Amino acid sequence: MNFNIERTSLALKKLGFPNLKEIQKATLEQFKEQDEIVLIAPTGSGKTLAFLLPILESLEKEQITQALIIAPARELALQIEQVFKSLRTDFKISCCYGGHQVKIEINNLIDIPQVIVGTPGRIADHLRRGTIHPKAIKTLVLDEFDKALEMGFEKDIKFITDALEGVEKRVLVSATSKDHLPEYCRMPNPKTLQFVGDKSYQGDLKSFYIQANNDDKLDLLKNLIYKVGNEPTIIFCNHREAVERINDLLFEHGIPTGIFHGALKQEHRERELIKLRNHSSNILLATDLASRGIDIPSIKNVIHYQLPPKEDAFIHRNGRTARMEANGNSFIVLKADEKLPDFAPAEIEEFSISAHSDIDLTTDYVTMYLNLGKKNKINKVDIVGLFYKKGGLVNDELGKIEVLDYCAYVAVKRTKSKELMRVLKKEKIKKQSFIVAVSR
């Protein structure tokens, strides 16, 4: 396998990164020397770029699929795709995942990509259809492998690894160490790169608990939200039914929240993460699906409304906050007769809150939806021009813009949204009419 090391320097310049992190340096170096690597690293450590850069260096110009990346969740697969695209190379990447139209993916795969990323079930489906050609694949990455096993993807992953007969490099990425790897991984003597516990990848996490006077924790949760709710916050529940129920109860009390769980349609889940990223929503009620593998930076508070049964899940939830140099808080909400779990941090403190005052939890921004996207040849520059020139926005009145395949989401100052709806109603982008609405 040949390596073009100049591509890394060029990609970093395009990203505006002056230097590589230690995790990226180590992975690049070991990828050249080792055929089997196990990378143990926390969320926010730069691990995605760590395995993408050596893949980039190893790619040949020939239009054949040379690298396959398996991720357990569609959000993670899409995130990996976006990171690769941000490198702005001449190589094509395609993303395949459940919930996405198979026909669209098949069309994308006709113009063969050098890199494919996707979820296990959908990748296995394409291999069976013959729409992914495995013979030339030299590199296999299994990202968030521990999560993939938890989600029951073992059968699909085994099918995929059995189908890839020409793989030369295998990289397994996980947040936790494994005593032994399944035989189908075909990694009998891997080189392990361990970055969990490295304080350079973590901020300062403070842990608290609050205890109700009875079996009803909802009032306690409401008071806590009013205390911290103007900061990005994820409230974790154990089941999707609990997420829905608590969301309905908080809505009745005028507390705005988004929800995130596996039964929601992909576009709903995508929209909730976008709103959290662009600061038009600050509170997300979620199952453990949101504990890793999704792109939501700068979470300040994690609230364990329901305690997970295992320590691993507790650690992964807390991993959403205190990432890199940022500090964060973790709160455990207990009933009157509930005790702290054995895996609670030794330095945990009781958090005292009084009954809430009437604090306004309304965000400064709202998210506007446009029904045009990349497949309509629309980009961020087009949208910026529309909202500044036709919409009359200035400076910070326009926030984060995210353009997807068939739609776009735009954060704007809440005070400007109604006027924008009126002004943009009859406008066009690149001679195309569009629908604009405030996303709920």
Image (tube, grey):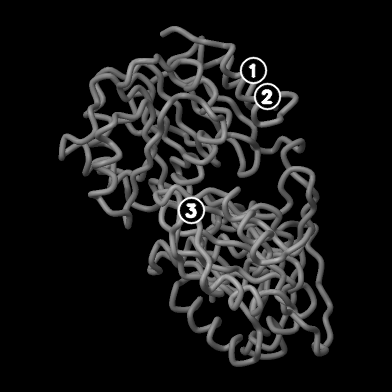
Q: Quadrant of the C terminus?
A: bottom right
Q: Quadrant of residue 363?
A: bottom right
Residue drawn at 56 percent across, 54 percent down:
402
Q: Nearer the viewer, residue 171 or 68?
A: 68
Q: Nearer the viewer, mark 1 or mark 3?
A: 3
Residue drawn at 56 percent across, 17 percent down:
7
Q: Which residue is mark 1?
A: 9
- Whether residue 413 appears in this view of the structure is yes
Q: Position of residue 234 (x, y in %)?
A: 63, 66
Q: Measured along the vertical axis of the image, is residue 410 above or below residue 225? A: above
Categorize mark 1 by other alpha carbons within 10 Å: few (<14), some (14-19), many (20+): some
Residue drawn at 44 percent across, 7 percent down:
2
Q: Nearer the viewer, residue 231 or 201?
A: 231
Residue drawn at 58 percent across, 34 percent down:
47
Cα–Cα span, label 2 and label 1: 6 Å
Which numbered tag is attached to residue 13? 2
Q: Which residue is mark 3?
A: 430
Q: Earlier in the sequence, mark 3 or mark 2?
A: 2
Residue type at mark 1: give it.
Ser
Q: Position of residue 18 (x, y in %)?
A: 75, 25
